[in-house]
Image: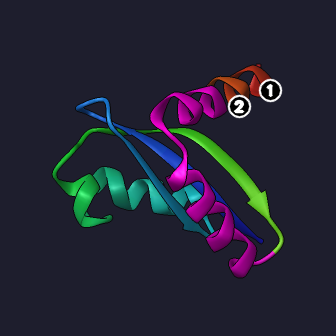
Amino acid sequence: MYYVYMLSCGDGSLYTGIAADVEKRLRQHQSGAGAKYTRSHLPVTLVYQECLPDKSAALRREYAIKQLPRTKKLLLVEEYRKSQA
C-alpha cells in the first residue's frame, strides 16, 4: 500500500508527495529532513491522504493532483476533512 498525501506549508502553499508510511514521512518533513521544498516552507501539516494499491498507482495519482489548480486541490482537502469528521 502506498499513499498520496498533501501538506499545508507555513506560507499557505501545498506540497504533494507519496509514501508507504505517511506518519513517518510527515515526521521527516516536520523535522526538516523531508523534501527540499518543505524544508524551506516549515511548519507543515498533513491535510489530505489517499490510499492506493501500489507505488505505480500512487505516482499516477500524485501527478494528477499536481496538475490540478489550487482551487481544486483545496476542494480535495475539504472533502477529505468532511470524510474524516
> Residue at image x 51%, y 28%?
71
Q: Write down the region rendered in magenta.
A: 54-77
Quarter occupied by residue 36:
bottom left
The crowding category of the residue bearing disc 2, from other C-alpha atoms within 10 Å (few below 14, some 14 to 19, many at least 20), is some
Query: Is residue 53 left or right of 9 when viewed as pictured?
Result: right
Query: Is residue 34 left or right of 6 when viewed as pictured?
Result: left
**Residue type for callout 1:** Ser
Q: Position of residue 59 (x, y in %)?
A: 62, 72
Which residue has dot 2 on it? 80
Q: Position of residue 15 (x, y in %)?
A: 41, 49
Viewer-proximal residue among 65 and 81: 65
Q: Position of residue 50 (x, y in %)?
A: 72, 51
Quarter occupied by residue 9:
top left
The crowding category of the residue bearing disc 1, from other C-alpha atoms within 10 Å (few below 14, some 14 to 19, many at least 20), is few
Label pair 1/2, CB-CB below 8 angstroms: yes
73 in the magenta segment: yes
> Residue at image x 67%, y 62%?
61
> Residue at image x 31%, y 65%?
35
Which residue has dot 1 on it? 83
- Regarding residue 12, the answer to whether it shows in the image is yes
**Secondary structure beneath disc 1?**
helix
> Residue at image x 56%, y 66%?
18
